[in-house]
Amino acid sequence: MADTDTLIGQTVSHYRIIEKLGGGGMGVVYKAEDTRLDRSVALKFLPEGLAHDRQAMERFRREAKAASALNHPNICTIYDIGEENGRAFIAMEFLEGKTLKHIIAGRPMELEKLLDVAIGVADGLNASHSKGIIHRDIKPANIFVTSQGRVKILDFGLAKLSKSMEGSTIMGDEAAAAFEATLTQPGAMMGTVAYMSPEQVRGESLDARTDIFSFGLVLYEMATGQQAFHGNTTGIVTDAILNRAPTPLGRMVSYDGLELERIVTKALQKDRNLRYQSAADVRGDLQEYKSSVATGGPAQPKLTQRLPKPSRKLLVRISVGALVMALAVGSWFLYPRPAHALKPTDTIVLADFANRTEDPVFDDTLKTALTVSLRQSPFLNVLGDEKVAATLRLMARPTTTLLTPDVASELCQRAGGKAYVAGSIAGLGNQYVLGVKAVNCQSGDTLAQMQVTATSNETVLSALDHAAAKLRERLGESLSSIQKFDTPIEQATTSSFEALKAYSLASKAQSEKGDAGSIPMLKRAIELDPTFASAYAALAVSYSNLGETDQASQYIQKAYELRGRASELEKLRITAFYCDLVTGEVPRVLETYELLSQEYPHSATAHINLGATYFELGQYEQALAEHLKAAGLISDDGVLYGNFIADYASLNRLEEAKAIYQKALTRKLDNAEVRSNVYGVAFLEGDVAEMARQEAWASGKPGVEDAFLSSQSDTEAFYGRLKGARQLSRRAAESAKQNDEQEMAALWRLNASLREAEFGNFAEAQQQTAAALALASTRDAQVLAGLAFAKSGDSARARRLANDLEKLFPHNTMVNAYWLPTVRASIEIRHNNPAKAIELLHATIPYDLASPPPGVGGLLQPAYVRGQAYLLLGQGNEAAAEFQKFFTYRGVSGNCSFGALARLQLGRAYAIQGDTPKAKAAYKEFLTLWKDADPDIPILKQAKVEYARLQ
């Protein structure tokens, strides 16, 4: 045949060629007229240079055979395959429009159009995968959008059969064999490098999830206009695909990108077991997001600020998420069904247990036992208590609603779950019959069902434990997993029904009354069984969330000692919390949560707490990345939303932070963690009315009001209104004491002491500090007290506290690398030894942006003290760089009064440099900020004198 450029006007088979449309390495495409059927078609010819290339020819034929097996609106239709004069061609649907590559052209797409295209691609992929065909080359150039807006997937030249479809007749045995033997030899990389999945880069066997990763990369490019992974060499690109995360989507888009970022992040999981498992799942989330946008869903984000209260990691809480029980079994009967009823990504809902006996001891306890037994499985993805409560609110039902099978089925559907598990117990003479079944909440089909007979009250839990193990097996979990993660209930927690009953009631009390409401029943549980490790851990979490870290430390210490009586999941959680709260070994905390996330890939808690730990270290990008991973596993969680706001704020991504608040309200996640950050948003925007609304919301709420009052005191102090700040700090301490939170009361007073010391009221600072230590002399209180004494000139007490802390907490990362150097450097500054102070503060450099416990008084403290030392040394440039951090990282410093004083210190630094105009401007900015300040504040008086000298 002649060169393809001379084909115009010729007839090939029954196709008259009209014009050339384009071409690439694997084909040249022409517009042609089908003279038999009188329709326009596209003819794709294999380039002449490849006509005798066996692999190229096989790929060409593969494209025709693969695509022709797929009849779907979102896949380009193949009409015919032929050969004339030694040149192979494919006749396909003629399309008018543009490829997605040309539509993007380096620019982000509008959100509405993006979602329409993405849903079309997902539909096409789902159709392809359902036929066992993997595309392997999904990229913008292979996605076509017609003039009518229809999406078409092109070019199946690299397609292959998935292993589950090998030997099928879709493409014929000969074709399938040719694909594998000739074209997909081990180690071969097929596709376009920038759009490959990690397993594709490594040359591993592929399944449909490789297309999902590539689709995630396309989604990223549609949203940002840029490739997620790019570089000058193939090595750079493949290294990024294997080892790096792309720039977070939220930093690249102008619209609310959080939900899209969650979808993209999940699609781009390096581990394909953590990725979306089907294109249908991606399509479902995209459609839900599109509906949300269409109905005026989440708005655009803005800033936040954390309340200066100890960080609240989502640990064991009392969601019964980790407890496990086990006893002896009677007989059980299993109704078999096909294995693998569920996939690891499917969510299940646990209904309440129906107690048909007259014994109230079974109320709540059996659901608790079943919950614990199933949640120790790394395979099953049990819907969390926070999500259950949020879904009930969306259903306009109280969060205390009994989850009957009907309610559980509706809730399961609303939450996007796959099945619900319901149980019942009834008396049979002196025995008990327990029934447990899993039901597909979409179709109503029973997935697995069994009955278990317990010979006595004492064997009920053991019978249920064995039934739960069988349920896990029938739902698709491997026997090896069940054997590894099936700690008997008695060994794991408690053999006492009464203790378990108290634990169950504590869980209900927590959901209704918060952490404080759970404590009495948890204490009752450990009275009934002093070896109940999970109850001790739950007490530790409740006290920690209330800011009582000393009591929390005591209870987690006991839980750690008893961790042998816990499931594998609970052991990891207890260990992580122990290292966090007691020893303070941050590297070990990170290591434990990393292990937890590997063992339990569905654990949002692991990623939430990893994020919180990175946040504590001041590594806010890593914190956000972990929280985005958690969002791919759990969407409606108030703690997670609060963490997102703090992450975005600390990164100065204020619009995104504010959008999280709007989304939280939309999803009825209205809690203290979220509200406290809204107060911070309002402060940074100067929105006094919004601040007042948040203050009113917190007023009178136990465990919440005190933190808001202390934050209000910081705001007053930020503007130099010290008398008002003092009054609010006193009220914060009184509110905490009324709620029996002595440690928090002490911390609020110490926060005030630090202000007094820095403002120059040294005697007042020392008096307040001593009074605070009389309330509580815990680790966190001693840390702040040491700093307050150092700044106010009581070096002896400051040194004593620092030395004691070093001895008591030798492995605590933040005590030894952040607090103690700052305390000791402050002492040296008071003694006019700035060079020594600089030397001491060298250890804090990696943690300058950290947010360590106790979470008050310490934000950017090392930078502030280092700046003071440089001022004493007469090094104005270096001092200015330190104080500038309060403006560069305003989302970190928030309404901390040191952020206001940094303006004055910056003026002093400029004065040392001899830059009088800049010095005057900085002084003026400070004095303007403090225009309504109390006139008798020593540092204000000194500032006015210094400013006058500059005139």
Image (cartoon, grey):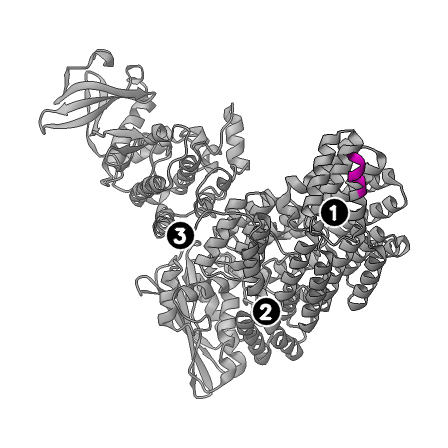
How would you rate the neighbour count of disc 1 (Cα within 10 Å): few for under 14, some for 14-19, many for 20 or more? many
Q: Which residue is mark 2?
A: 701
Residue 907 placement (x, y as % from top left) = 74, 37
Report the residue at 61% width, 52% height from top.
Answer: 612
416 relative position to 635: left or right: left
SS class, disc 1: helix
Q: Which residue is mark 1?
A: 861
Whole-angstrom CA distance, mark 2 to mark 3, is: 29 Å
The magenta region covers 945-951
Contact flag, marks 3 and 1 (Cβ < 8 Å): no
Does the magenta run of residues contain 949?
Answer: yes
163 relative position to 95: left or right: right
Q: Quadrant of the C terminus?
A: top right
SS class, disc 2: loop
Question: Looking at the picture, which amino acid does disc 3 mark?
Answer: Gly
Precedes in sequence: disc 2 or disc 3: 3
Report the residue at 69% width, 59% height from top.
Answer: 578
Residue 299 placement (x, y as % from top left) = 44, 49
Asked whether residue 730 is in view, the answer is: yes
Precedes in sequence: disc 3 or disc 1: 3
